[in-house]
Amino acid sequence: MTTASLKRRLYAGCAAVLVAGLACAGWIYRTAEDGPDLSGAYQVIVVDGVPHTIAPGESKAYVRDLQRYGGKTAVLFDEIDRWFMGLWRGKSLALTVAFLVVLASFALYFVALALPEGEPRDPGGE
């Protein structure tokens, strides 16, 4: 395979990854629901007869208990963990996919750009 042929294939792959990935990210964004994640709800409060759940990070009692047992570092790591897990659900997932697709596309583009222009020379001198 020649270098020029490899460059063309890498540029085509770059474009294909970008188009397909952004299309998937758009589909995810359109179909995703952005409801709060209350799977680990810490408290349930009743207001006017309607129960409401409070996410652990929003509860002062949870944060106080976490700080009591693990210190401020535990609270910080809990917030970082909740932020990172939030990147993988709902509309945030679409933005994460779009960012990763653009990053992969740039990587393919710069690999193709770094390849030499001319044909490889035969070291045997033929």
Image: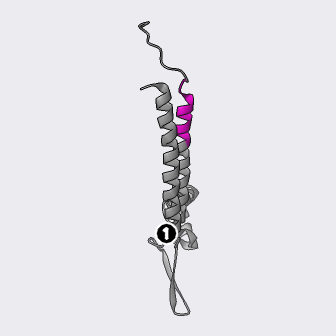
> Can you say whether 114 is above or below 23 in the image?
above
Does the segment drawn in magenta span residue 108?
Answer: yes
Image quarter in which the C terminus is found: top left
Q: Vertically, is 62 above or below 119?
A: below
Answer whether residue 111 is magenta in the image: yes
Is residue 32 something that shows in the picture?
no
Type of amino acid at the residue the image marks with label 1:
Thr
Q: In the image, residue 36 lies at what x, y percent?
A: 52, 72
Magenta residues: mostly which secondary structure?
helix
Front position in the image: 108 or 67: 108
Judging depth in this view, the residue of 28 and 74 nearest the camera is 28
The residue lying furthest to the bottom in this view is 49
Residue at point 47%, 14% (across, down): 121
* Image coordinates for residue 68, horizontal then vertical, percent: 54, 64
Determine the residue positioned at 55% across, 73% down.
61
Residue at left offset 53%, top offset 70%: 34
Residue picked out by circle 1: 31
* SS under mark 1: helix
Residue 76 seen: yes
Magenta-colored span: 106-116
Which quarter of the figure has residue 95?
bottom right
Q: Residue 105: x percent and y percent?
A: 53, 43
Quadrant into which the N terminus falls? top left
Is disc 1 surrounded by few (<14), some (14 to 19) or many (20+) residues within 10 Å?
few
**Residue 76 point in image, percent of width and height:** 57, 57
